[in-house]
Image (tube, rainbow, N blue to C red):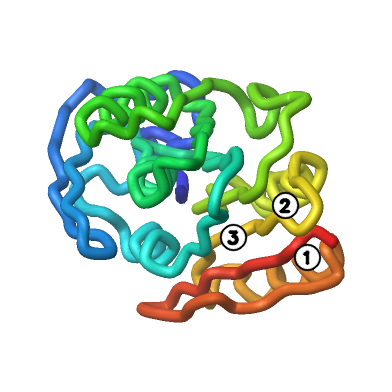
């Protein structure tokens, strides 16, 4: 979820300042059709970005349990996970109030009844909860410290053998983040590569 510069919105802001302009994305993911309401002030409002698509197409889902989409934007990753496996309970979190509103609308649109959205900074809304899997398309342009906080915080909220799966641009911190994964979890693998993105995965031992 990169930020914009200049007079435009920063997607990792609590209150987007841009005038609300709505849009709709219809797309096929893993053989299923999804429809997402989007808006100005959130990341990739005109199309599902390639990184998010790669994460959704390659993500490993547990058979059951609680799953977290951290920095959910309008909700594509978490909603897809909820639709693909109705046995999961998916929690979506974002600091951006417009993103949270959109994600809630998109849960209804896609009948993802096993998903819910919480608003707040990183892991604050899920304090005390543990997850079988954590997904993130992180706000790299908000700063590497924010991305590192997502990785470190994930470890604190993951059950034994849980997976962290994160999509990153290969040329924008990809190798550095791979090292941070290894330092944090003691292991890391590249789950998928395509179109200049890679999906990193690590397991909590």
Q: Residue at x 26, y 60 (%)?
A: 29
Number of the label disc, if any, that sits on residue 165 = 3
Q: Of helix, strand and loop, which one carries label 1?
A: helix
Q: Residue sitting at 13 percent across and 39 percent down?
A: 24
Q: Label 2: state its secondary structure.
A: helix
Residue 105 against residue 44 in the figure, above or below: above
Tell me if residue 135 comes above or below residue 45 in the rendering: below
Q: Which mark is residue 151?
A: 2
- Position above or below: 101 against 205: above
Left or right, residue 34 beside residue 13 = left
Circle nearer the viewer, 1 or 3: 3
In this rendered view, identify the residue nearer to me: 13 or 62. Answer: 62
- Residue 196 visible in this rendered orientation of the protein: yes
Whether residue 4 is visible: no
Side (left or right) of 140 relative to 180: left
Q: Quadrant of the C terminus?
A: bottom right
Please say if the residues under marks 1 and 2 sit with CB atoms less than 8 Å apart: yes
Write down the quadrant of residue 176 in the picture: bottom right
Q: Say which mark, if any, is on residue 180.
A: 1
* Residue at the image point whose x is 27% and y is 24% from the top: 105
* Place of residue 197 in the rendered image (x, y in percent of width and height, measured from the top left): 46, 73
Which sits earlier in the primary sequence, circle 1 or circle 2? Answer: 2
| Mark 3 element type | strand
**Mark pair 1, 3: CA separation:** 13 Å
């Amino acid at each position: 979820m990169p930020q914009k510069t200049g007079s435009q919105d920063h997607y990792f802001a609590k209150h987007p300042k841009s005038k609300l302009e709505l849009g709709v994305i219809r797309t096929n993911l893993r053989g299923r059709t999804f429809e997402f309401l989007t808006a100005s002030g959130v990341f990739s409002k005109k199309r599902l970005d390639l990184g998010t698509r790669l994460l959704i197409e390659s993500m490993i889902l547990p058979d059951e349990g609680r799953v977290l989409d951290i920095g959910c934007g309008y909700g594509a990753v978490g909603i897809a996970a909820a639709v693909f496996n109705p046995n999961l309970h998916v929690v979506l979190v974002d600091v951006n109030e417009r993103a949270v509103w959109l994600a809630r609308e998109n849960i209804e649109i896609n009948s993802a009844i096993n998903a819910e959205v919480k608003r707040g900074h990183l892991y604050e809304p899920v304090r005390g909860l543990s997850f079988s899997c954590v997904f993130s398309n992180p706000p790299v342009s908000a700063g590497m410290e924010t991305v590192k906080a997502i990785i470190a915080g994930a470890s604190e909220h993951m059950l034994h053998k849980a997976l962290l799966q994160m999509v990153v641009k290969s040329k924008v911190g990809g190798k550095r983040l791979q090292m941070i994964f290894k330092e944090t979890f003691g292991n890391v693998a590249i789950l998928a590569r395509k179109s200049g993105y890679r999906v990193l995965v690590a397991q909590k031992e």
